[in-house]
Structures are given as C-alpha cells and as structure tokens.
Amino acid sequence: MITFDEKTKIFKLDTPNTSYVMGIADNRYLGHVYYGKKLNDTNLGYLMRTKEAPFVPSENLREKVSFFDSFPMEMPCGGVGDFRESALLVSCKGQEAAELFYVSHEIFHGKKKLKGLPATWGENCDTLEITMEDEVLGLQVVLSYTAFTDTDAIARSLRLVNGGSGDLYVKKALSACVDMDQKDFEFLSLFGSWARERHIETVPVGHGGISIESLRGEPGHQEHPFFALTGKNCSQDAGEAYGFHFVYSGNFLGKVKMNQFGNLRAVMGIHPDSFTWKLEPGAEFTAPEVILVYSDEGLGKMSRTYHDLYRNHLIRSPWKDKARPVLINNWEATYFEFDDEKLLSIAREASKAGIEMLVMDDGWFGHRNSDNSSLGDWQVNEDKIKGGLEHLVDEVNALGMEFGIWFEPEMISPDSDLYCNHPDWVLQMQGRVPGLAREQLVLDFSRPEVLEYVYESVASILRTANISYVKWDMNRPLADCGSSYLPEDQQGEVMHRHVLGVYELQERLLEEFPNLLLENCSGGGARFDPGMLYYSPQIWCSDDTDAVERLMIQEGTQLVYPLSAIGAHVSDCPNHATGRVTPFATRGIVAMAGTFGYELDITKIPPEEREMIPQQIEEFKKYYPLVNAGDYYRLASYRENHIYDCYELVSKNKKQAMVTFVQVMAEPNIHSRKIYLKGLEEDTVYEVEGKRYTGSTLMYAGLLIPGMWGDYQAKIIDVLAV
Ligand code: GLA
C-alpha cells in the first residue's frame, strides 16, 4: 500500500512487513525518512529534522549549502552543495549541476514496464511516481517506487526527460539512493573470479566508504551487483539486513559511505565511468531498477524474499515452474573435438540413462576447431556435422531426446568471414588496435545492422531444426568501447547500448520462439544477474563444477537467487577446474541444488557411475518441486566451518522438506553432527529416516547426522509430515 499525507507531505510505502518513508521538505526537496520494519504511524515528518540547524533554505538561506550537505536526499545531484555521493549528474549549458524540486506525484495499482529493460512485473503491487524538476535545465526526473503487496520488496528506478531546448548529457544516473542512520552496519558482497564466482564476504562499514563495481560491460566474475547492509551479529535467522540488487547486466556501481554525522548513504546504479548519455530535447532515458529488500529476521529471510520476488515477479519464461529437461552438454566431454557421430554416441548412451536433452556446445560452426576462429560465422560446419543440423537434430529427437545449441552472438573472431566483410562492425576506438580476449572482439551493438545480422544468425538456425534450448554465451569483457557508427558526443553510450542490444535480441528471440528454453552464460557465471533472469529462467552458474568449490559458489548465488535459476551439472573427475576427485554420488547431490544436468563423456565414464545416472535423475525429479518452489534455509556453511555444508528446502505448506548434507572433510572421533532444521511447523509430526519427530524437536533439539567414512560424502534427508 502507498499513501501520501497532504498535511505532513509524507509518502509511506508499505510491503507486508516493511515501510519505506519519504517526505517533501520546504515544499520542494524530496527527503528520505525511514526504511525498515513496518510502521503504523504516518506522523513521521519529525525524522527529517528540518526544524533543527541548519534548517531548510526558506528559513535559513545563508546556510543552504550546509542544508544540502546534511539533508537525506532521495535523488542527490552534484554541483549545488551536497558533497556526498551524488546519484545524478548532468551536464548542460556549461553547468554540471542540478537542483531537483518536487512537482507532482501519482500513485497507481500495478507497475509499468521499463522501456527496453528487464524489470519486475505483476499485479500484487502499487507504484508511486514522483516527478521532480530542475527548471534551469528543463530536466524532469521521474522517480519510480513499486511496493509489492505479497513480498517485502521495493523496486526503484528513474526516468529522465529533457524538457528543455538544448542537448543535455547525463553523466551519472544511479537508480537508487538511500540515506540511513548509522547502526554499525557491515557490508556483505559477493566477490570472485573465473571458476569461483560469488563467494560471500563481509567487512565493516567505516568513514572511507566501500564500493562494488564493474566496468567490464557485464557484471563479471569478480564482483556482483548486490550488497547487503547487515546489522552487527546479523545471522541467518536474526538481525537486520538491507539488500540492494541491481536488475541490470552491464557496468554497475554500488557504494556505501558514512558521512561526517555518522549517517550512511547507499547508492546503486549504472557505473558513471565510461557512461555519458546524450538527451536531445524531448528525449528520455530510463535507468534500470534496484530491488530493495529489508529483513529483520536475518539473511535467511532476505534470501527467501528475493527468491519469491524473482520467481513470482521477474522470471517470465513458460519454463518458470516446470522441471527443465535433464540435459547432457558435450563441452567438457569433447571440447572442440567432435562430429555428429561422437555427439550421437553420447546421445545414445544418455537416452538409455534417462537424460532428456543433448546440448551441442561451442565448435559446430564456421571452421571453429579451437577458440581462435569463426565467431560471427553462424553456419553449420558440415565437415563436423555431416548431413547438416536438421539431420543431427532428427536423429537426437528419434532417441526421444530434445536438442539444444550454443551461441556466442555478441562476438566476432578476427579469423571469420564476418570480420573480413565488416571490419567496421567491431568495437574499437579510432587510432587504436582493439585488444583481443580469448582471441575475439566484440560486435558494435549500437549499429542497427549488426543487431539485425546477429538476430538473423541465431533465428535462422533455430528455424532450420527442432531446437528446444539455446545456451547464450559471452566469453570476454567489453573493452575499446568505441563505435564507428555513433558521433563523437555519443561514444559514452556504447557500453549501455550493448546491454540494451542484448536485451532487445533476447526479447525478439523469445517473441519468435516463445517456448524456447534459454540459458544465459558468460565464461561460466560472469553475467549471472537479475536482468538476465527476465529473459532466461536459468543461468549457467560457473565453469567450475567441482562439487566442493560449487558449495561456496552456490551458497553465494543462493543468497539472492532462487535455486531453480542456478545451472548446475555433474561433470567428470579429476575435475577440469580443480583436479579434485569427488564421488559421483556427491557430485549429483550438489548439482541437484539447481537445474540438473551432465557435462561429461557418458561413453567413457566408469560403468558403475553410468549406472547411477537413472537413479540420480529420479531423485532430481522427486526433489524438483522443492528446488523450484520451496523456501530455502541455510543450516551450515562449509565456507565458514571448513568441514561440512548443509541447507534445507521446505515446501510452502510445510508438509515436506529436504536437507542436503555434504561432509567435505571426514573427521576422526566425531560420531555425529547435530543440525537444527528450520521453517517447519512446531506441532506437526514429521518422518525422517524411519523415525518420527515433531517439528519443534527437529528445529530446537536437532537431528543427528552420523559421521560418514571419507571426505566428500553427501546425503539428502527426506522430511515428510505424517
Ligand atoms: C564458456 C562457457 C562454457 C562453454 C565454453 C565454450 O566458457 O561457460 O560452458 O560453453 O564457453 O567455449
């Protein structure tokens, strides 16, 4: 619910358990008042402290700059006296400044689409749009806040309109700014690298400020467009957590800084470096949205809120609630060395084991036999796929399996026909030789003809055969971001235009192939972000499928993403990223925390492992309703204890749960571990491994897990209400 109190000029946005409050001070400035646990009062104007020094400008004009530097602005602009982090910076008429005055607002049911951008959607929400204006520039800023009525989440974004007569250059347009009272917060973020994405890290917040960012043109393996401000001693179950998550797949900045008065300003949005957007008179710019979540029941509640929001209000795919076909991907099985016969030999064994889809990964097009050529030449290599794609797909279909295919549409190899014909289609800066990464360059998505070519390349392949699934990959960051198509004063748009181009292409693809199962990917998990979830219901989580490393990657990913979105496969050992050898059964159990599949040469693995596959698939299907829709509770973290990992999924009706326990390190002379279940009904009797306990016993007295012999052992424990 959203209300506006005319007398006090206070806006109050309520979700089921949280409130977000703002107010208009001095009849013009929009200030932040409160965000946190739900409040029942509307009389909250006193929290803006406009009645104490330095007072509002109408009462004390001689200290206007001091007012600007202490007032909790909802959309702070640089240049006029707020010396803290700005959210909006525009350059126009030789000025780099703006002062936004409140003009009007509108409250309505539901939520508008964000033009060209991924965004949350749905009926169970209300939206407040506040229009602000800088008269000198003729700039209008529409701040949008959606409060969900079924989930404790608030979506924030903004739209800029050039209502003036001259060009305006947007140099910074962050989507959210929240000024908060100091509460001894810690800053939790997800960091990593290739093959070890999204590890959780928590550091104290101090005066120097702390930030997360990407300038890679994608979120990257290294940092993630998410941070949480957590109260001291915030645990899985107790304490305060404020989550900020950016629904965007490009450069980002998230920053928190304590000011001279001990208060915090938290901002998030598109990174202002390498960004300038030209707004001609009448033109608009929409910034992507940030999802704010507040929990006073620890990180666990925050995670469950994000999971529910993304499942119910972000993912759109018709596959959203369906079990995805169990797939086998040939990448780690063959790398580039395969032909149709090899793929079919894999498919034959796979279909016998109950695997439902074959995915042909990189290397099927142009003359690509290693990663040094052919990106852009999306024609089937008939030396490898003899008889053509349709024939191969028909053969796979005849085995009762579906067929999926890999693309890397944004890229171009210098060794390609496409590059020979269109050297001007790559991102490059005049006078500089663009840098290669994985021996490839990036296509210039500001060029309409490039988008058209890329779309047709992918769509025409999909039109030729019965293809059910596409893995859309992106294997290098953007650099040398210049476009020979755009004029000089629009070169700062290249990186954002690239992301918009990706969105446009994926949207178009889903319009033409509405049942396509799309999986996004970027060198593993470098573009795992909420923006991508709007187009694909699942994202490849990491190129590292080692069962132990995956525990940490998946824990960090589960912190904000529903498990049904997390691409997870069983691969061969020694693992290709770590060299570690773990039992096949454990690899299966770890991969069940996501969309399940295999990434190995099934014709070569030991027969006893192959024989385990039908059973693993059966278990995956049995647990899938919990993986897809259950409430997630983390019971123990290997990252923290260095010995074992444990999480639980509970059905919404609390009749069923599964507990996944992985004993990474065997310990001598420890006979059992006690775990405390969560999220059950206290008085309900549950059956666990043939014994009966009430929910209260399982949650408060605990369940004993006997020690297992050897490292890397795992089991799933069923919990069923009787
Ligand atoms: C990326 C992906 C892998 C595989 C290769 C192919 O690294 O993450 O799964 O598709 O590209 O080149």
Image (cartoon, rainbow, N blue to C red):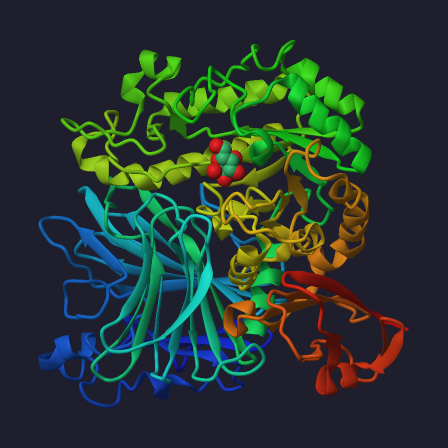
- In this rendering, position of residue 630 left or right of residue 302: right
Q: Where is residue 125 in the image (x, y as percent from the top left)?
A: 58, 62
Q: Quadrant of the C terminus?
A: bottom right
Q: Position of residue 608 (x, y in %)?
A: 77, 43
Of residues 712 and 510, the one drawn nearer to the viewer in this rendering: 712
Residue at the bottom extreme of this rendering: 52
Across and down, in percent, residue 721 comes to 86, 72
* 45, 348: nearer the viewer: 348
Quadrant position of residue 354: top right
Q: Can residue 684 be seen in this view?
A: no
- Reply above or below: 621 against 243: above
Tell me which residue sits at (80%, 42%) in the image.
611
Q: Which of 555 and 255 is in front in this view?
A: 555
Give the left or right position of residue 303, taking residue 247 as reference.
right
* 204 up-or-down from 505: above or below: below
Total tally of numbered discs in the picture: 0
**Residue at 50% across / 87% down in the picture?**
41
* Res 184 quadrant in image: bottom left
The answer, for residue 371, to whether it is visible in the render is yes
Q: Determine the residue positioned at 60% across, 33% down.
A: 333
The residue shown at (75%, 63%) is: 716
Residue 18 drawn at (x, y percent): 53, 76
Residue 580 in the figure: left or right of residue 501: right
Q: Can you say whether 61 is above or below 167 in the image?
A: below
